[in-house]
């Protein structure tokens, strides 16, 4: 009951700090709109056609099938196909970088295949990252299989619809790659929650300023009860702020929050709990509103940067450092569910573990110093 | 006894703030704690209130050791700290509700007690206002209201009238007497002698972390009741007159401030007639004369002055 009393009045006192609350709500929404208007590096890149070449000297079924493959519409969407007159020329064009890959179908390949001899298609490619070679290999497998079926008496050899060898996967980017506003709606909401650690901090340091801590010290209430009450009250207020920002960016500015609502709220609530506890820890350590505020700003900025709060960070070093930032777990969990990018469960577990550790630390410190 | 303090010790590293302090507070009395700044009375109050731990000795409340029965003791204590301890962003009602709940009050009882406390302190019409809109006196009254809400057996008041207007101070002093009449014991600290003189039944004088005198007002004044002061207002004063008075048997000191003579003499010695004779012989007229018996001020100044010199 006493924890509930402290929590309720902590929440109420935060709510009446209109200026802080307005700033915590307005700032991330404003920044999201401003930065979200500049698509910058968030548009999906147009994939250019890959230049490849071939020399078909076979006049039989194999050569015809390969011609059909290379001239199909499906192949044309991905590859810029060029016919080459000479095998050496084709090899040279790959070496010079003019072509990414070159195939030579030797003369009389179909006849030799019919006689049971093996046929080798010569392929020249870049090696790693070569997208043409897999297509050629698929053709070979497909043709080999069909050739076997023919030998066993199948009258209509199915060389396979050459279109199938180049599977046309229309990559649907809408909703799967974040636009600028989608990215910042999440990252700045999480930043706002991090900065909202100020509420946890104020729950401790404000009492020093108005001496009300002396009355709490004299009351028959344990330090741990006061600490838990303040943490719950601060978390509750932060969560309310987070929900307001979430609803505004989702419905007011149509940011992509297309994830399970339960998951979104769970991630936000956990993150609010972490932030409130962090603010309280900093307050216990510094015991000064000014110093605590400064430390909180530094910590929050650091966590935000390493978690990609201002722009996506794609570096192994940053990825390692980001494991110390709670916002990276929250952000990655949300991105995993919305954009199928990353591992949802490991990030969710990471956030849960982080919140447990931080809240436990705050509890240990607060049970003696809480008031 | 409601409070028993025996050989209380408190150290801050090498500094001994309380050096074997001891006193008792009887149930139903208003006990005054007097001393100069740095004497140790705030530290004593802090220990009794539960703000500070102590390093040695014994502190009992209603027979229970405070350290071992912390929560039980706190439930029966009401604290009026020297600094205003209120939430300025909550209304008067909300402040009382918050603290009342921490003391275990709920529902109708809590509401009734809040109304009672507001009425007692004259703040019923300001229950929906926040303390930041209150005057200093009103804040002090709300400070008291928060302490008496749960009907504590002992109320500790640390300089509750500092910095407020005389009207509010009188209101507070009358309230304290009323609280005492209603059954609360009170420990009261103040730098204002007239307040202590007016309301306290027993007083302890503290200096350098020790109780140097303890008792009722008459018991304390009898400690230094060997001298008295005679103040004579004259038409004129001269050096010869002053030196003559100083030589009178029984006179310890004679000093002049303008036309005003202050003669300190030993009680029981018949020196006054000789002093008047000397004044008459110097052709000065006596405008007025009054005698001051030993007071609490003189006890305080005498005892702490001697200790300071030591």
Image (cartoon, coloured by chain):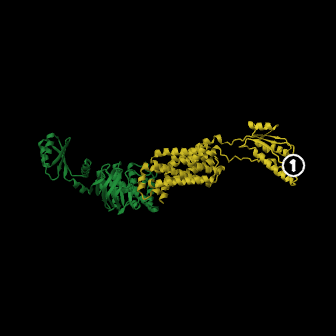
Measuring 77% from the left and 47% from the top, which residue is drawn there?
A137
Is residue A91 found left or right of B80 in the rendered image?
Answer: right
Q: Colour of chain A?
A: yellow
For label 1, count other residues whose C-alpha is less than 10 Å away and answer few (under 14), some (14-19) or many (20+): few
Using the image as rendered, state which of residue A196 and residue B131 is in the foreground. A196
Can residue A371 be seen by looking at this rendering? no
Lateral position of residue A347 relative to residue A172, left or right = left
Image side of residue B103 versus residue A32, left or right: left
Secondary structure beneath disc 1?
helix
Where's residue A165, x and y in %? 78, 48
Q: Position of residue A342 (x, y in %)?
A: 64, 50
The answer to which of B230 and A56 lies nearer the viewer is A56
The chain carrying label 1 is A
The N terminus of chain B - image quarter: bottom left
Q: Residue at x 46, y 46 (%)?
A: A289
Residue pictured at 65% horizontal, 44% vertical: A179
Of B178 and A206, the residue lying toward us:
A206
Is residue A116 visible in the rendered image? The answer is yes
- Circle 1 residue: A114
Residue B226 percent across, percent down from the top left: 19, 53
Say whether residue B240 is left or right of residue B220: left
| Residue A54 vs residue B28, the one in the foreground | A54
How far from the left and from the top, in percent, is residue B117?
40, 57
Q: Which chain is green?
A: B
**Furthest-bottom residue in this view:** B63
> How many labels, in total?
1
């Amino acid at each position: 009951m006493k924890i509930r009393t402290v929590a309720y009045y902590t929440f109420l006192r935060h709510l009446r700090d209109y200026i802080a609350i307005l700033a915590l709500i307005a700032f991330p929404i404003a920044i999201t709109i401003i930065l979200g208007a500049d698509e910058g590096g968030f548009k999906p890149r147009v994939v250019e056609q890959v230049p490849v070449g071939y020399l078909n000297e076979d006049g039989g079924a194999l050569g015809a099938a390969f011609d059909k493959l290379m001239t199909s519409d499906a192949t044309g969407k991905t590859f810029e196909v060029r016919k080459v007159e000479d095998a050496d020329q084709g090899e040279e064009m790959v070496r010079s970088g003019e072509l990414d890959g070159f195939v030579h179908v030797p003369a009389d390949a179909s006849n030799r295949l019919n006689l049971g001899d093996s046929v080798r298609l010569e392929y020249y490619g870049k090696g790693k990252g070569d997208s043409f070679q897999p297509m050629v290999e698929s053709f070979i497998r497909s043709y080999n299989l069909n050739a076997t079926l023919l030998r066993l008496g199948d009258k209509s050899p199915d060389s396979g619809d050459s279109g199938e060898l180049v599977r046309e996967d229309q990559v649907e980017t809408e909703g799967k790659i974040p636009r600028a506003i989608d990215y910042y709606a999440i990252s700045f909401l999480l930043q706002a929650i991090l900065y909202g650690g100020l509420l946890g901090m104020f729950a401790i340091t404000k009492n020093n300023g108005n001496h009300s801590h002396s009355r709490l010290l004299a009351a028959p209430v344990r330090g741990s009860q006061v600490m838990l009450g303040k943490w719950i009250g601060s978390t509750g207020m932060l969560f309310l702020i987070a929900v307001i920002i979430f609803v505004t960016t989702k419905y007011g500015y149509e940011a992509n929050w297309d994830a399970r609502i339960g998951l979104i709220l769970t991630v936000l609530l956990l993150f609010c709990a972490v932030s409130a506890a962090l603010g309280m820890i900093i307050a216990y350590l510094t015991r000064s509103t000014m110093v605590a505020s400064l430390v909180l700003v530094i910590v929050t900025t650091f966590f935000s940067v390493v978690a990609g709060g201002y722009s996506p960070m794609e570096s192994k070093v940053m990825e390692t450092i980001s494991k110390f930032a709670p916002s990276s777990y929250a952000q990655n969990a949300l991105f995993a569910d919305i954009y199928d990018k990353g591992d949802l469960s490991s990030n969710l577990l990471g956030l849960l573990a982080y919140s447990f550790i931080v809240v436990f630390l705050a509890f240990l410190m607060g049970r003696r110093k809480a008031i | 006894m409601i409070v028993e303090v025996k050989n209380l010790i408190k150290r801050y590293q090498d500094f001994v703030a309380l050096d074997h302090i001891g006193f008792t507070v009887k149930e139903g009395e208003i006990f005054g704690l007097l001393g100069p700044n740095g004497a140790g009375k705030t530290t004593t109050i802090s220990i009794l209130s539960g703000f500070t731990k102590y390093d040695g000795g014994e502190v009992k409340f209603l027979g229970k050791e405070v350290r071992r029965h912390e929560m039980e003791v706190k439930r029966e204590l009401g604290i009026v700290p020297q600094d205003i301890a209120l939430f300025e962003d909550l209304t008067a009602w909300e402040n009382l509700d918050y603290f009342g709940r921490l003391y275990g009050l709920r529902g109708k009882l809590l509401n009734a007690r809040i109304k009672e406390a507001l009425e007692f302190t004259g703040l019923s019409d300001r229950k929906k206002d926040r303390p930041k809109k209150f005057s200093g006196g009103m804040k002090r009254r709300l400070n008291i209201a928060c302490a008496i809400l749960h009907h504590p057996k002992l109320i500790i008041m640390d300089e509750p009238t500092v910095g407020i207007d005389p009207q509010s101070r009188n209101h507070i002093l009358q309230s304290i007497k009323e609280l005492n009449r209603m059954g609360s014991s009170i420990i009261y600290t103040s730098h204002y002698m007239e307040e202590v003189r007016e309301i306290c039944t027993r007083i302890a004088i503290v200096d350098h972390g020790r109780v140097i005198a303890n008792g009722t007002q008459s018991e304390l004044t009898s400690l230094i009741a060997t001298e008295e002061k005679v103040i004579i207002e004259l038409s004129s004063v001269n050096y010869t007159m002053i030196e003559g008075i100083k030589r009178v048997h029984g006179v310890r000191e004679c000093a002049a401030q303008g036309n005003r003579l202050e003669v300190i003499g030993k009680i029981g010695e018949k020196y006054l007639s000789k002093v008047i004779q000397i004044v008459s012989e110097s052709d000065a007229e006596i405008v007025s004369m009054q005698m001051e018996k030993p007071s609490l001020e003189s006890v305080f100044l005498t005892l702490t002055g001697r200790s300071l010199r030591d």
